[in-house]
Amino acid sequence: MAAEETTGTTTGTTGTTGAEKVRSGGPGPRALTDAALSDFLGERQFGTLATVKRDGHPHLTTMVYHWDPEERTVRFSSTADRLKVRQIGHNPLAALHVSSDDHWTFAVAEGEAEVSDPTTTPGDAVGRELLTLLPAAARPNLLEDETAFFAQQVAERRVVIRLRVGRLYGTALDIAG
């Protein structure tokens, strides 16, 4: 796309947009280190999970996730009857795409996913793992709230999707505005 076809809000005193700067030879993408990518994943909680449909096309779904940098594992909560769970059972290759609010920075975590068995007894190992996926502020503080949480997870047939990350990559564009 030529620069004259670009529309958008202007930034600074030069009158160019961030997109125009990129096309006109402005700052290019900056590769992020593994540590920076890991930090970026840890700072966010929403991303797009890509799984593979039987026909080979990608299936994309926005998910809340939890990144464990020590294990290099991304965890998601889902229900046993969801399409993505079945797709992982047929083909474990998956990826998570996470973007900054302005979309100038992104990270992709690729690897093989596995799905736990559904939680079947309130407070079982899967239920406890599901509890750890909640942000600290959302975790039940009282025993009765925790009991209700576990019972709800069993009723919903909740599972944990674990994406074991084999490749982590992404870039940032240093664009203001």
Image (cartoon, rainbow, N blue to C red):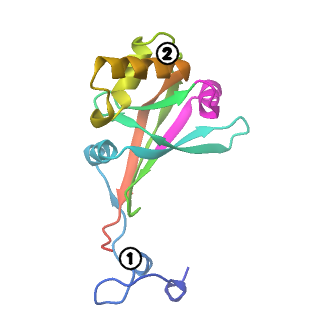
Left or right of 165 in this view: 61? right
**Residue 161 x, y percent position in the rendering:** 49, 27
Task: Evaluate whether residue 157 shows in this view.
Answer: no
The answer to whether 17 is drawn above or below residue 171 in the figure is below
As displayed, is residue 31 above or below residue 46? Answer: below
Report whether 52 appears left or right of 67: right
**Magenta stretch containing residue 17, yes or no?**
no
Earlier sequence position, callout 1 versus callout 2: 1
Amino acid residing under circle 1? Gly
Depth order, front residue of 100/137? 137
Quarter residue 1 falls in: bottom right
Task: Inspect the image, locate mark 2, and give the three-letter code of the amino acid beneath it.
Answer: Thr
User: Is disc 1 in contact with disc 2, using a CB cutoff of under 8 Å?
Assistant: no
- Image coordinates for residue 12, horizontal then vertical, percent: 28, 85
Q: Disc 1 vs disc 2: which is toward the camera? A: 2
Residue at left offset 50%, top offset 40%:
95
Bounds of the magenta segment: 80-96
Of the numbered discs in the image, which one, if any, rests on residue 40? none
In percent of the image, x 62 and y 43: which residue is there?
A: 59
What's the distance in space between the residues labelled 1 and 2, CA to CA?
Answer: 47 Å
Task: Identify which residue, 140 or 136, lies in the foreground.
Answer: 140
Whether residue 71 is visible here, answered yes or no, is yes
Q: Is residue 88 magenta?
A: yes
Residue 10 pos. (x, y %): 38, 85
Q: In which quarter of the image is the C terminus?
A: bottom left
**99 on left or right of 69:** right
Secondary structure of the residue carrying tag 1 is: helix
Total label count? 2
Q: Which residue is drawn at 28% across and 29% down?
A: 70
Which residue is identified by label 1?
18
**Which mark is drawn over residue 119?**
2
Kindly identify the residue that appears in the image at 31 percent across and 48 percent down: 40
